[in-house]
Amino acid sequence: MKKRTVLGALVLLGVWVGTGAWAQDSFKVGLILPMTGPFASTGKQIEAAARLYMAQNGTTVVGKKVELIVKDDTAAPDVTKRLAQELVVNEKVQVLAGFGLTPLALSTAPIATQSKTPLVVMAAATSSITQASPYIIRTSFTLPQAAVAMGDWAPRNGIKKVVSLVSDYGPGIDAEKFFKDRFLFNGGQVLETLRVPMRNPDFAPFLQKVRDLKPDALYVFVPSGAGTALMKQFVERGLDKSGIRLIGTGDVTDDDILNGMGDVALGVVTSHHYSASHDSPINKKFVDAFQKANGGLRPNFMAVGGYDGMRVIYEALRATKGQGGGDALLAAMKGQIFESPRGPMFIDAQTRDVVHNIYIRKVERVNGQLFNNEFESLKDVKDPGKSR
Ligand code: DHB
């Protein structure tokens, strides 16, 4: 070959590689989230956390350029499924991730199975999700993990009679059932189980009923973001002055909105896997960096699910040396063990579900800001939904 021809070929190759046309060189992650509509805070938190993880850990891993493709499913399950199909077929993503609500993860599970693409659930938390496809891995949490912990704590702390109030879909049903079973086992009494619509709930008539029933406490589950409306109506119905305590899983005092709730939130006790005030050097670094990158926004439990999800994806890419293949990536995701901003966690290789500590927390004011301060912890909690 003549010198000039070789040079020309090299220049062409340079342009080809430089424009990213060499698909082999990139590793694409399709991140599907509700970025608009009533659950947009979940999408915003997870995208910000995923981008933070990438900024901190670099975008080149074992010679591959990691590319995040973010899509807005508007929290509509048929849209999530269609976007996942397009990402797999057209974009050739190697991993699907995100999934802001249970129905969005469930509708997409068949795509993961058919295409053998690992699907990392960073938000949705109904126990059964991981059973919908052998390609699902979860880095968020499960409602039974949090609910059982509260079913143990409440009766040990003077709460004997409870009314439960949950959003009427997967995670709410899990939150109700697993709390109730454990609470009854511990000698408690559930006076009524109330369910409110998942979308645009009007809590007022339900809260009036709670007032009339006069339980020691109201136990609640509402999805991330809905806590503000519940708290407002709790005050409007005078429940804050009625002596009825508020307890629940930590979704209701979500760090994203907690500060805006005001004094009504003080003293609310919840069980959850993550608090922005979790006392560890890793968490302090995470919270500081997240706030710096996002105009002071406080990360919530959705953010930590996204951040840890990216960690699981990065390490699977590293372990498979960039060779790719859904089955190899999936195998490398199973069993990962590491310290998260939430505390220690691992991905159970059998169930593909997250195992982590569950903390009992109380809302307190620290330096003028409201926080869920952890005061008890249960170690290495597996999903209680899996043993049935
Ligand atoms: C789910 C959504 C939430 O916002 C949350 O806090 C817990 C669970 C869900 O749909 O699975």
Image: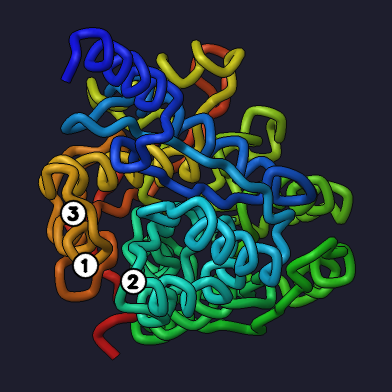
Nearest to N terminus: mark 2 or mark 3: 2
Q: Which residue: 25% across, 40% down?
A: 314
Check the image and report above or below for 301 versus 346.
above
**Is 310 left or right of 110, judged from the image as shown?**
left
> What separation in Å lies between label 1 and label 3 (alpha carbons)?
19 Å
Q: Secondary structure at mark 1?
A: helix
> What separation in Å lies between label 2 and label 1 (alpha carbons)?
7 Å
| Dot 2 and dot 1 residues touching (CB under 8 Å) | yes
Q: Position of residue 269 (x, y in %)?
A: 49, 49
Q: Nearer the viewer, residue 83 or 148?
A: 83
- Residue carrying label 2: 116
Tag 1: residue type? Asp
- Residue carrying label 3: 346
Nearest to N terminus: mark 1 or mark 3: 1
Q: Position of residue 224 (x, y in %)?
A: 61, 51
Q: Which residue: 88% across, 49% down?
A: 236
Asked where in the image residue 157 lies, by quadrant, the reply is: bottom left
Which numbered disc covers residue 327?
1
Check the image and report above or below for 157 versus 31.
below
For the view shown, which residue lies furthest in the bottom direction? 388
Q: Secondary structure at mark 3?
A: strand
Quadrant into which the C terminus falls: bottom left
**Label 3 Cα crowd, 10 Å radius (few <14 / some 14-19 / many 20+):** many
**Is 53 left or right of 126, judged from the image as shown?**
left
